[in-house]
Image (tube, grey):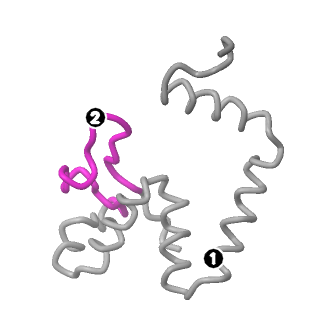
Amino acid sequence: MGNDVPKNEKEEKGRRKREALGNDELNFNVKLRCVNGIMGAVPTPMSVAIKFACLTGLRPSEALESVRLINDKEAFSKYYNSTRGALEHFKFPVLFLRSTKKAIAGKDNQE
């Protein structure tokens, strides 16, 4: 085995990220076209959920939990702060607060 072989999964993940940065086939516009293609191929409610996940930057599981909270009238009244126009993820720490990449709040632009 040569020195170029990653020693563990973390190193392999880092190598793939570095590779992707220089790969035009994986740039933002290509990813955006891919997401738009998926959104056009699924029913509207799923398309809206995919768009929400992309725009918020939440992890997929967090985006699903967020959509669930938005669709639950009782939970939504606690989750959404209409004064601030924000989803307050911190009010649901079990769902959104982790040791890395904590989701604290999301801003609503009324669109």
The quarter of the image holding the N terminus is top right
Is residue 59 shown above or below 76? Answer: above
Query: In screen coordinates, is 3 left or right of 73?
Result: right
Q: In the orientation shown, which residue stands out farthest toward the bottom? A: 43
Residue drawn 48% across the image and 57% down it: 56
In the rendered image, which residue does mark 1 sit on?
39
Q: Position of residue 8 (x, y in %)?
A: 49, 24
- At mark 2, the secondary structure is loop
Residues tagged 2 and 1 counted as in contact (Cβ below 8 A):
no
Q: In the orientation shown, which residue stands out farthest toward the right? A: 24
Query: In screen coordinates, is 96 left or right of 74?
Result: right
Q: Earlier in the sequence, mark 2 or mark 1?
A: 1
Residue drawn 19% across the image and 50% down it: 93
Q: Position of residue 85 (x, y in %)?
A: 37, 63
Numbered circle sitting on residue 81:
none
Residue drawn 27% across the image and 71% down it: 69
Q: Position of residue 35 (x, y in %)?
A: 66, 66
* 8 part of magenta stretch: no
Numbered circle sitting on residue 99:
2
Magenta segment: 84-106
Is residue 29 shown above or below 73? Answer: above
Is residue 26 shown above or below 71? Answer: above
- At mark 1, the secondary structure is helix
- Amino acid type shown at disc 2: Ser
* 105 part of magenta stretch: yes
